[in-house]
Amino acid sequence: MMGISGFEPTFLVGLGAVRENHRTALAALGGRRLTGFSIVRFAEDGDWFADCPVVLDFDGVQVEICHWKLDELSIGWNSIDTRAAISDWESFELTPEWSSADERLEPFVGQELREVALLEWRPSSHDLAVGTIAVEFVFDAGRFHIANALDENSIHVGDAHPEFARHRLDRGARA
């Protein structure tokens, strides 16, 4: 998909589905160091192409997060080859390529992950994003989460908006 080697997303909707399918593996990341990350940028201008997955490497365990449409989330494991060129974009004006440069994520590289949580958007008034799920990564020096920005990924550093309901994933938890 998207010309990304190994990317075969399984999109899920809602807290229950994401938790059931990924709780144990996400929680097991706790105690590992973030050793790297990859996002897709365009070679011509360096802009982030937020439609593509965000790939995080925790001591050799790779988690691949991609939001799609209004409320779908795919979490993949060790399947994307970020060393392979992104293909089948010849008719497009810009050239996508993997990058390990991002000012939001760079400060977390080398830090040990303390905890992972799923964030469920529960605003006080109804909006189109109600029920969407973000994935939060907590370190001693801070936190970031990858959320749905209405058909693409967004990366936010710091505490989540207060209208996110936080569902901590404990190590050893069962689906």
Image: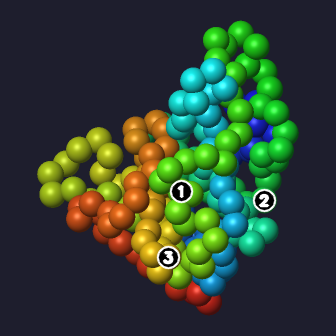
Give the percent coordinates (x, y) of residue 26. Answer: 61, 72
Q: Which residue is mark 1?
A: 105
Which numbered circle lies on residue 91? Answer: none
**What percent of the width, then of the height, locates residue 125?**
15, 51
In the picture of the structure, the residue carrying the numbered disc 3 is 139
The N terminus lies in which quarter of the figure? top right
Q: For mark 1, does the 10 Å Cα neighbourhood hold few (<14), some (14 to 19), or many (20 or more) residues?
A: some
Q: Is residue 69 above or below residue 11?
A: above
Q: Is residue 119 visible?
A: yes
For marks 3 and 1, give the CA distance: 12 Å
Q: Point out residue 58 in the picture as x, y percentages from the top left corner.
A: 69, 69
Bin the neighbour count of mark 3 within 10 Å (Cα to Cα): few under 14, some 14-19, many 20 and up. some
Q: Is residue 160 above or below residue 166?
A: above
Q: Quadrant of the C terminus?
A: bottom right
SS at mark 2 in the image: loop
Left/right placement of residue 142 relative to residue 171 reads: left
Dot label at residue 78 = 2
Q: CA distance from mark 3 to mark 2?
A: 22 Å
Q: Are marks 3 and 1 in contact (CB under 8 Å)?
A: no
Residue at (64% x, 71% y) in the render = 110
